[in-house]
Image (tube, helix red, strand yellow):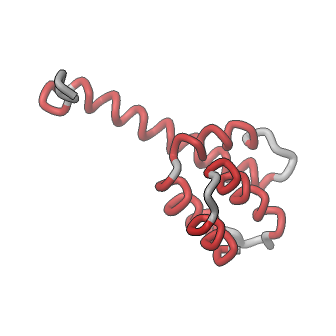
Amino acid sequence: MICLMKGTLYFAVETKKICHMAFHLLGFADEDNSKYIKFCMEEVYRNYPAIFFEIAENYKDAKESKQADLANRIIKEHNRILKEKELCYKIKDLQPSKIH
């Protein structure tokens, strides 16, 4: 599954289809899908965080528990990163400059 996801990630053009594919491939997973989920979090989420979060919102209440688990992990990670950014923006030296 990781090889299929790598091929999709590295050679597909449409980002939404790439993110949907990450969830669809979980339907073929056996019981231990921890390596695949780790790959999705490290590679797919790192490359397309906003779109993967948007797609995960659709899968958070999925009938397939594996899909819901991945979606909840993505949502949790995305919210954690947003909170960290908000905390950084409160520090004057870390605020984006007014020029940019």
In the image, taking residue 24 as reference, residue 80 lies left or right, namely: left
Q: Is residue 68 above or below residue 27?
A: above
**Given the current orientation, which residue lies at the most extreme front position?**
13
* Count of numbered labels shown in the rendering: 0
Q: Is residue 2 above or below residue 13?
A: below
- The C terminus lies in which quarter of the figure? top left
Residue at 59% x, 61% y is 40
In the image, taking residue 26 as reference, residue 38 lies left or right, namely: left
| Residue 17: image location, x then y, percent | 70, 53
| Residue 68: image location, x then y, percent | 74, 48
Residue at 63% x, 63% y is 12
In the image, taking residue 56 as reference, residue 93 lies left or right, namely: left
In the image shown, does 49 or 26 lie closer to the viewer? 49
**Given the current orientation, which residue lies at the most extreme left position?**
93
Quadrant for residue 97, please give it. top left
- The N terminus lies in which quarter of the figure? bottom right
Q: Is residue 90 above or below residue 47?
A: above
